[in-house]
Image (spheres, coloured by chain):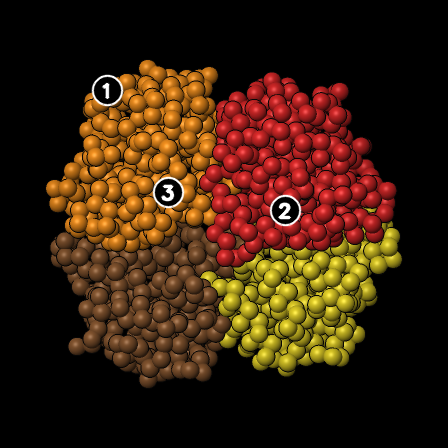
Chain colours: A orange, B red, C yellow, D brown
Amino acid sequence: MSSFQPLRGVVPPVCTPLDASGEIDTASLTRHVEHFVSGGVHGLFALGSSSEVAFLTDRQRETVLRTVVEAVAGRVPVLAGVIDMTTPRVLVHAEAAREAGADALVATAPFYARTHPVEIAHHFRTLRARVDLPLYAYDLPVSVHSKLSVALVRELAEDGTLAGLKDSSGDEGGLRRLLVELGGRHGRADGPAPGFSVLTGSELTVDAALLAGADGVVPGLGNVDPAGYVRLYDAVRAGDLDRAVKEQERLVELFGMVDAGPESEMGRNSSAIGAFKHALRLLGVFAEGTTAAPQIQLGEASVALVEERLRGAGLLPVR
Amino acid sequence: MSSFQPLRGVVPPVCTPLDASGEIDTASLTRHVEHFVSGGVHGLFALGSSSEVAFLTDRQRETVLRTVVEAVAGRVPVLAGVIDMTTPRVLVHAEAAREAGADALVATAPFYARTHPVEIAHHFRTLRARVDLPLYAYDLPVSVHSKLSVALVRELAEDGTLAGLKDSSGDEGGLRRLLVELGGRHGRADGPAPGFSVLTGSELTVDAALLAGADGVVPGLGNVDPAGYVRLYDAVRAGDLDRAVKEQERLVELFGMVDAGPESEMGRNSSAIGAFKHALRLLGVFAEGTTAAPQIQLGEASVALVEERLRGAGLLPVR
Amino acid sequence: MSSFQPLRGVVPPVCTPLDASGEIDTASLTRHVEHFVSGGVHGLFALGSSSEVAFLTDRQRETVLRTVVEAVAGRVPVLAGVIDMTTPRVLVHAEAAREAGADALVATAPFYARTHPVEIAHHFRTLRARVDLPLYAYDLPVSVHSKLSVALVRELAEDGTLAGLKDSSGDEGGLRRLLVELGGRHGRADGPAPGFSVLTGSELTVDAALLAGADGVVPGLGNVDPAGYVRLYDAVRAGDLDRAVKEQERLVELFGMVDAGPESEMGRNSSAIGAFKHALRLLGVFAEGTTAAPQIQLGEASVALVEERLRGAGLLPVR
Amino acid sequence: MSSFQPLRGVVPPVCTPLDASGEIDTASLTRHVEHFVSGGVHGLFALGSSSEVAFLTDRQRETVLRTVVEAVAGRVPVLAGVIDMTTPRVLVHAEAAREAGADALVATAPFYARTHPVEIAHHFRTLRARVDLPLYAYDLPVSVHSKLSVALVRELAEDGTLAGLKDSSGDEGGLRRLLVELGGRHGRADGPAPGFSVLTGSELTVDAALLAGADGVVPGLGNVDPAGYVRLYDAVRAGDLDRAVKEQERLVELFGMVDAGPESEMGRNSSAIGAFKHALRLLGVFAEGTTAAPQIQLGEASVALVEERLRGAGLLPVR
């Protein structure tokens, strides 16, 4: 692990382009990697929730990861989600990710079966012991229905099981408690877990998270506007909070694209991912805006809203 | 589907014996099939939640299913759980289950990503259209965090998408509404979905469910005492409710084996499955009581409780 | 407590008639008591959830209870709900209920503030110690967001804190475990808490609950058809399960009146209580079908559905 | 409403001192008001969740409010919580609060009965129409189990129903969306609801909320260290984010006092409120650290932790 630098900056989860039949559109995916890298991102997170990892077969996951790793060609680190229900199944994905060239792994707590915190700790320790790659915990109670406690994350950070945390719990108070326990905004390097990276998945409050000492962000909306998140990150690093807040506010307005009309018969997941994918289509990155089965596809009114928000944020027309 | 009879009776979910390394113990599994068949069960449900399906790799799932199908040798139908997050991943399992010789498939609603009821309906319809086996919906909100509504199940029953329902929702009022809408206890054959099977997974109220018109039961505790559930089923069919209640009460007491002490650091899932597996070990069916990672293993006090409950129910010493 | 017989039979929660201004309509309430008593009920539960107790001011609660007690005139016992957030507030209601002539009290676990099971036990013990009336625990997680465990209820039953339980948790498996621990269907009198009454609030599975050994039922739908629930109860007591199931199935169909259309902008609570109240209006018992603020009133289509269900169940035209 | 200035700054919820018998200790409460005012707070919120409002009888609520209003003597505005289940009951509290001299009211969405968003809007509109005081919505899903949507708050802000929001939902992303929709950090005065106050209840991320444009904070921990929150607020207003973050980090460490040991048999609510009250006792403000029934009292080890955190934050010894 010594050669792997603590992860910092903007590390977007990579949306997965699909063709009309639901297969991976590798040409669009390669274009998307360039979209990210030219936007200045500091890393990429393939096979996360925004990548529709839950909807991809093992074969498709491998195609995605190999395509991303090849297109990135070492310019930034590639984190790979290894999302499945329990330790034995996650281990299969972890081995596959290692072989496909991932630089690090991202795993959630177990789901489907109810699990005790001691079992969750055992889960992460087993993953770390069995596959020799830096391991990030992905705290995502909305999907896995358990929350990683501050005490558990701290324990696994201090003993070297975890290289970092991707916090998508929405519990900003808990995140702040963790950051303070690890040394606060300025004392992390001398704290109990010096190399530990804290990344927030809360894409609407990135200025606040960075102000509090988070190392970076994994923004789903970063698919649409990677350069915007990089500007936001740079502004905070430069101490220009006014500029950071303005950039964040622009991104919050852009995020409004996920609001499919109340008449839409679709899940919250399919409306958000569908909006990002159609935005990428309108931006010329993706060939299609298709989401995976059984998700309902975005209707015309929702696509029009996406376009409106892109224009409002200055992303259309493409310059 | 015409050759497949509506499923009735006791259809236990098959616990999966593991050796100390976590691999499938096929010898114990074969013995377990005989334990079930000699107990008089009317079908078997492999790869369900009580089978630790969430903890088994795809390779292990195949081993389990082929072993069960071979050991059963056509004596009773074998249902196969195809448990995964979304339609594309479930389809992979469904194809594998068909090739391994399953007689029917059992699928939950999608999980991990939030899904709209219209998307859930689309999920089941796609599964049915793509794999030519009878399909059972598995209503398990405790694991998948959405509930199949009476209206949705009825719609999918009437249009032939579903051959039946395994209801583990614990919502007995909703189940009763469904049964009444389908014709009630005596009018099901003339109702809107005549061949549709309703199986309850509520193992502690089987007498009540059968009284209300359910066709059968999928009892996790049926791993330990299949003959007891068969006697309970037969008593209700024979109209001897007094005998049925007494048998159910004996089984409720036996079920107390799942209560690991409050000091135990284990999940509710691991304590229940661990108890069933240790009971099977004490009964001479399983070689080990091991549960899959990352579950904590049952402690001595909990195993002693299992033994006590087996004696109390007259199952030990083995005759 | 010695003079208070264990409660058995049908004990409906009494809907509270309101006039157009939201005030208690005592004339309708007095008629409603006669509707119940002439239907043969074994007790009445005033100021429960179906009574809109959460919507009534303290002054209105007193009016309701005094009106019911006076109209009942000792013919059946009157239980009074003392529904509020915590012990000090519930004690105020309990004193008022005692002064208004209630025969017993019904209290939930605390709500609004998160409470530990030890604090819940302390809550019930304090209530019992401070007001000398039999105390029933009301298990209603849908409203109070905590579930009374089998162990807690058993402890409070054995030490005499509780005279009984009104179980509206929907957890029929847990209820069965409690009944078996208390001695099962036939051994309750010799069990650890001989006089303890178990009443189910699950109005769609009363046949099943009585079969399992419950003492009685508190059916919201019993407002509309008290005589139907009494026939159901009597059929089970007489051992005629076939008749009981048929009566229960008729009541399940009648219950369909609570399904306001999906287009309705109203809560589940307001649609169910509104349906019962409009049914009582159509039956000539209530002057109005008004529900309390801020509930939305039933629309015409929903009222038409109520009427249709009343006709279907043979309750209209009134004979 | 024209004379009531938009509320800004630090507006702590006032903990309610109780004597050993559970009665209001008005002498301590009067001292506590001085503790707040001398700390520089900009308003006080009496009868909120941290005030144990759920545990106070109506008579005690009146005593609390009259004591606070008298002690404050107009130096800062006094907001009064009117916490109860539904509109009719809240109206009783609202009238009482107006008579006791409150400057504004704070109400949650209805609870106990499930309520539709349209009914929630009707609730707030009725309260505003019937009692002529500025009305704040209190978004507290952990207690009332429904979340006020951005759209609903915005609608009630624009039409003048609400004077402001106290957001204790923990949904910082939603709060940011609301702030941006209302004009963002700098454009609120020209936005769709110019006088609307947004106060956060998230006491561990106040720097972030103020950075994003919130008008103020309602910190439970502000009972213990009002001057600290005032310094934090002033630092942000002065544009000194570094100082703000340092102050916030000190307060986050101080907040660790709420962690009662895992062995404690008490609810999360009783451990937090108990910690604040014992801290006030150690600071010489309260005579006792007693919390209301049925809460378990803090044990010695927990009290020692409180003392340790007070010392760590420089609040002990009292200077």
Q: Nearer the viewer, residue D258 or A3?
A: A3
Q: Nearer the viewer, mark 1 or mark 2?
A: 1
Which x, y percent locates residue C151? 60, 62
Mark 2 lies on residue: B170
Q: What number of labels is visible?
A: 3
- Badge 1 sits on which subunit? A
State the SS at label 3.
strand
Which x, y percent locates residue A137? 34, 40
Q: As shown in the figure, which amino acid type bears the numbered disc 2?
A: Gly
Mark 1 lies on residue: A73
Query: Quadrant of the rendered structure where residue A52 is?
Result: top left
State the SS at label 2.
loop
Q: Are marks 1 and 2 in contact (CB under 8 Å)?
A: no
Specify few, some or many for label 3: CA neighbours under 10 Å numbering under 14, 14-19, or 20 or more.
Answer: many
Residue at 65%, 74% in the rendered image: C160
Q: As shown in the figure, which amino acid type bears the numbered disc 1?
A: Ala
> On residue A139, which mark appears?
3
Q: Is residue A191 left or right of residue C181?
A: left
Q: As shown in the figure, which amino acid type bears the numbered disc 3?
A: Asp
